[in-house]
Image: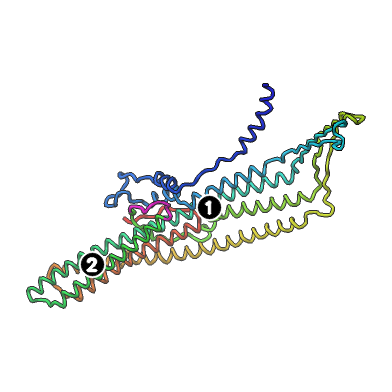
Amino acid sequence: MKQLATRLALPCVWLVAGCYQPRPLDARAVMDEVAAETPARPAKTATAGAAPGALTEDEAVALALRSNPDLRAARHQRGVADGELVAAGALANPTVDFDFIHVEDYGSRRGWAIALGWEPPQPGIYSARRAAARAQVDAVVADLAEAEAQLANAVRGAHAVLLAISEKRLLVEQAIAGRRQIAALVGKRVNGGASTRLDLGLADLATSQVERDRDDLAAQELAATAQLAALLGTALPNGVTGTLPTDVSAPPALEPLVETALAARPALVAEEKRFAAREETLRLEHARSWPWFRLTAIPRYRSDASDVHPNDFAMGLQLTLPIFNQNGGPIRVAEAQRDQERELFRKQLIGLRRDIENARAQVALRSETLRRYETSLLPALDAQEKLLATSMAGGQLDVVALLQAADVILRSRRDAVDVRLACYRARLDLERAVGRHSPAAAAP
């Protein structure tokens, strides 16, 4: 009885192992999972003046690398590649043939035969298949590193856009306060007969115009927040904190940047590994053009009571001779795919150098513009604002001139924010092309 249980145990284990347990997909459960995985930002890390839970640039990048849905899905490609590597190293299963002999008169001439067969792995094919699968795993790892770098770069850019909008909203709020002050002063002068209601109407219209600008900026902030949330893979963040960098240094020389990209860009590593996989596939197809054997009986046992040898043992071997088909077609296909992969790698190198050249030129241009703003325009704006405040304090109200001056100051300061944003985004484009992030110099 115990022996029978032992004999039945192995088939039962195979049966249980082959059963698949489905994993249900429930929208509410997944939504709860997302909510549970979204961490709250500690209040102690919030910058003074920032909303509770506002994200710094580094916090936004870390959250995106953890929660971005596209990146989370892409990471499972590593499991696919690992499974293909396991499959590439698996040996062929043996086969068992069981035959009944003398079926036409089985009652008096019983006989049966059993044969064990197996095809050993061909060394060239086996090693090439494993090497190709290993190269594919390395390519997937490099692709994931490239995707993470590109996502981090995109998050930094989206975070900078929100910082720029926040600065512009602060400028507009200050401008609204200034125009309301001008309107209040004009109202007093109208009551005293020193100004006309036309001047008061111009002041009120100027205030309304800037208030519309504030509403437009609020809409832009909502859109930019939604874009950042899409990159983060979470609900809308509660604002951002930090300052736009003001790095005006010249970009490094071209050739050192190219050398850095060749060493640091994961996309190049991925292409190299895919080329290596094509090489191994070509080696595999060449190996198929060589003769190989299959063990058809290792051994075969035959029991035939009517035979002279009722208990018969035999060995069998089957040899495949590549005479009519020397695998020429698959070899040519593999060669073409290998050469195509090389051209794709060459194309990527050409695009890489072009992107670095363009980004470097943009950094030089934007840095020069920002330097000019920092050294000449912003000091002039400070002086103009002091003159404007002095005129208002002294009651020197030429309404048209004051409003024109205030508009020029507001527009110029908003342009200065755009210049800082453009300079930082140009540096982000250069970092994206090179494949390496350098902490930026923040505004004082």
Tell me what residue is drawn at x 39 percent, y 50 percent.
58
Q: Which residues are magenta?
A: 230-238
**Residue 385 percent location from the top left of the image:** 22, 67
Tell me what residue is drawn at x 67 percent, y 53 percent.
278
* The C terminus, quarter of image: bottom left
Q: Nearer the viewer, mark 2 or mark 1?
A: 1
Distance between mark 2 and mark 1 Cα atoms: 47 Å
The residue carrying mark 1 is 264
**Residue 218 percent location from the top left of the image:** 31, 62
Q: How many marks?
A: 2
- Pointer 2 local density, CA inside 10 Å: few below 14, some 14–19, many at least 20: few
* Relative to 251, residue 88 above or below: above
Residue type for callout 2: Ala
Between 291 and 251, which is closer to the camera in this rendering? 291
98 relative position to 156: left or right: right
Would you say residue 16 is visible in this rendering?
yes
Between 428 and 221, which is closer to the camera in this rendering? 221
* Relative to 425, residue 206 above or below: below
State if disc 1 and disc 2 touch (CB < 8 Å): no
Between 100 and 327, which is closer to the camera in this rendering? 100
Magenta-drawn stretch contains 274: no
Would you say residue 246 is visible in this rendering?
no
* The N terminus, quarter of image: top right
The residue carrying mark 2 is 383
Tell me what residue is drawn at x 43 percent, y 60 percent.
427
Q: Quadrant of residue 368?
A: bottom left
